[in-house]
Image: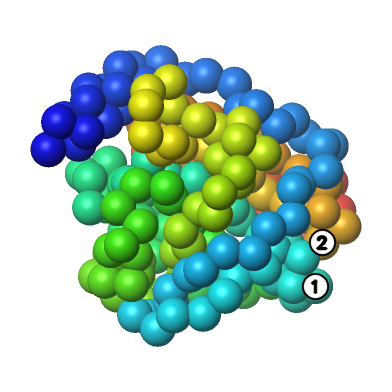
Amino acid sequence: MKRLTAGLAALAVLAATPVLAALKQGDKAPDFTAPAALAGKDFSFTLSKALKKGPVVLYFFPAAYTSGCTAEAHEFAEATPDFEKLGATVIGVTAGNVDRIKDFSKEHCRDKFAVAAAPAGLIKSYDVSLPMPGGWSNRTSYVIAPDGKILMAYTDGNFAGHVTKTMDAVKAFKAGK
C-alpha cells in the first residue's frame, strides 16, 4: 500500500507539468519482447514483428488500475479502430501491477489493444523511469515507423493529449509528411 501511495503521489506531481520524452524523434527505438495480453489472452509481443505490419504506437503508463492509466486506456481503446484503419498497432506497456495486465486488457483496454509487462531493462532503455523507487515508468507515448525510427515522442503525466498527439503523428506518417 505504501508503494501505491508513493506512486500516486509521484504521478500527481508529474501530472502538473509536461516534460520532454527521453528518446527523440529520429532515434532508433530499442527492440524488445515482452509478455503481453490482448482480450485477456496471453501472448508474446515483439516490437520488430509488429513494425513489419506498420507503425507502432507504444505508450508507457505507470500502473494498471490507477485512475489516470485507466482513463488513458479507455481513450486508446476508443481510438484503436482508427489507428488500425491507418495500419498502426497500439501497445501499452507498464512496470506497475504487471500481475494484473491480463484483466486490465479485458476491462480497460476493452479487448481492443494489447498491454505488456515491461521486461527488465525496458524502462531504462527507453529512459522513461519515474523518479521513485519501484521501477515504474512515467507516461510517455511514442510513434515508431516501420524502420524502427521514432516519429514522435511525448511525455506528460496527464493522460489527456496522448491519443490525439499519437493519432496526429500516425496520420502525418501515412500522408508522407
Is 111 rendered above or below residue 82?
below
The answer to whether one can see residue 171 in this image is no
Q: Quadrant of residue 98?
A: bottom left
Which residue is at 40% across, 83% downward? 41
Element marked by disc 1: loop
Is 36 rendered above or below residue 177?
below
Is 148 rendered above or below residue 83?
above
User: Where does the image place residue 91, in percent across and percent down from the top left?
Assistant: 53, 61
In this picture, residue 12 sits left or right of residue 92: left
User: Where does the image place residue 86, in percent across and percent down from the top left?
Assistant: 67, 68
Residue at mark 2? 146
State how many labels appear: 2
Q: CA distance from mark 1 to mark 2?
A: 6 Å
Q: Are marks 1 and 2 in contact (CB under 8 Å)?
A: yes
87, 123: nearer the viewer: 123
Element marked by disc 2: loop
Q: Residues within 10 Å of mark 1 (few under 14, many from 20)?
A: few
The colour scheme applied to this rendered structure is rainbow
Q: Which residue is outermost to the left?
A: 1
Work out whether mark 1 precedes mark 2 in sequence or the reverse, and give the earlier one.
1
> Could you say which disc has been placed on residue 52 in the image?
1
Residue type at mark 1 is: Lys
107, 152: nearer the viewer: 107
The answer to whether one can see residue 75 in this image is yes
User: Where does the image place residue 158, in percent across and percent down from the top left?
Assistant: 36, 31
Q: Quadrant of residue 47?
A: bottom right
Which residue is at 12% across, 38% downward? 1
Residue type at mark 2 is: Pro
